Image (spheres, helix red, strand yellow):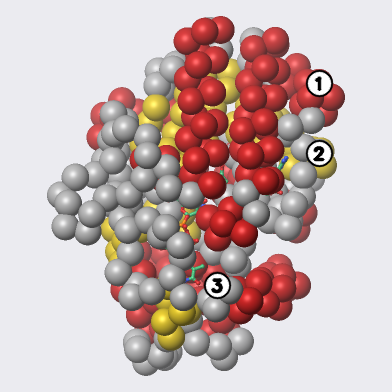
Amino acid sequence: MRVLVTGGAGFIGANFVHQTVAERPDAAVTVLDKLTYAGNRASLANLESVHLVVGDVADREVVDPLVADADLVVHFAAESHNDNSLRDPSPFVTTNLVGTFTLLEAVRRHGVRYHHISTDEVYGDLDLDDPAKFTPSTPYNPSSPYSATKAGSDLLVRAWVRSFGVEATISNCSNNYGPFQHIEKFIPRQITNLIDGVKPKLYGAGANVRDWIHVLDHNRAVWAIIEKGRIGETYLIGANGEKNNKEVVELILELMGHEPDDYEHVADRPGHDLRYAIDATRLREETGWEPTFKDFRSGLADTIAWYRANEAWWRPQKAEVEAKYAAQGQ
Ligand code: NAD
Ligand code: DAU
């Protein structure tokens, strides 16, 4: 099977490529990645069989021949960070909307199976004391420019399925953690701060809840949907991992040998979503998928060990990332 992975040099995409090469010897993997600030060639080091094409998913001339040569497209590429979308939404519109449109037109022309990677943020947020979780029938209600462009890209996929018969599935996953995550994101930012002797930074009071899942479990679910999912359907991916941000910071501090209150509060994110929570019943019942990382504490300890062991991978970005946060009081 010839698999085209967009965004394969980013966090989740790179883990997907490693897993696919290790577990699926029948798959020939090509990565299409623009290598933006979030893409890192080093994340694909030692994968000689993987062909990396540096290019833009919104560029039809690049996309068309790659899709024509594929049996399956798995579309991870995106501008993915909410805080960046508040500073400058423009690349979010181009990559997340025009990029998805460009891929959909190519899979339509060439009759190629397509899987769309999306986020639980398309559903907006939940109250802290609400027993409800997101389900595939929750109305779309995105809050940030990032989540609005992801929501728009999902709707493009649905329309291309219905209007043009494109063979596509969509998955909306909750917050991922694990190796190769860019250090602008919450968990790796705090781990690398502590390695540098800097206190973790908690937005606002730290009461916001995220539903954490290990990146390897996300990607296993993606393969389960590709193999067993129904065309045109949306599958929510989550592993019942709800934690508030304060709890996560306290656990990182404890695992790294610090006092649990050794963090500081910084300016909150404008429009900050309060809580995400996933009901993954459809995924579990239709595909049999179950998460393998059931203990957040040990998954987090492994992730901390990975950042300690791979300083050369993240160090070049640290000063610039922190300067951007400092400029906005975070
Ligand atoms: P990331 O920012 O780490 O990686 C994105 C990758 O896409 C990078 O390698 C980047 O170079 C590439 N890219 C960006 N613009 C491109 C373009 N125009 N053309 C080609 N490549 C381009 O992102 P991530 O956290 O790995 O997220 C991957 C996908 O998963 C995204 O679609 C995101 O919305 C979704 N998602 C992420 C999470 C999470 O917790 N990180 C959760 C649910 C869904
Ligand atoms: O829910 C899925 C989404 O999860 C994905 O679609 C996004 O691509 C991914 O970035 C993530 O979005 P979040 O905004 O939830 O993740 P982030 O890592 O930026 O922040 C997680 C929480 O931690 C959020 O409530 C904001 C808070 N935070 C973040 C940073 C960077 C802090 O308290 N301090 C920080 O320094």
Q: Measured from the top left, where is residue 90 in percent x and y?
A: 67, 46
Q: Which residue is mark 3?
A: 189
Amino acid type of the residue that numbered disc 3 sits on in the rendered structure: Arg
Taking the image as drawn, is residue 229 in sight?
yes
Judge by depth and name the residue closer to the eye, 226 or 123: 123
Amino acid tagged 1? Pro
Using residue 257 as the reference point, say whether residue 320 is left or right of it: right
Q: Is residue 94 left or right of residue 263?
A: right
State yes or no: discs 1 and 2 in contact (Cβ < 8 Å).
Answer: no
Give the residue at x 62% y 59%. Answer: 87
Residue under pointer 1 = 65
Q: CA distance from mark 1 to mark 3?
A: 38 Å
Distance Cα–Cα, label 2 vs label 3: 28 Å
Q: Residue at x 77, y 37 (%)?
A: 56
Q: Secondary structure at mark 1?
A: helix
Question: Measured from the top left, where is residue 121 in percent x and y?
Answer: 42, 45
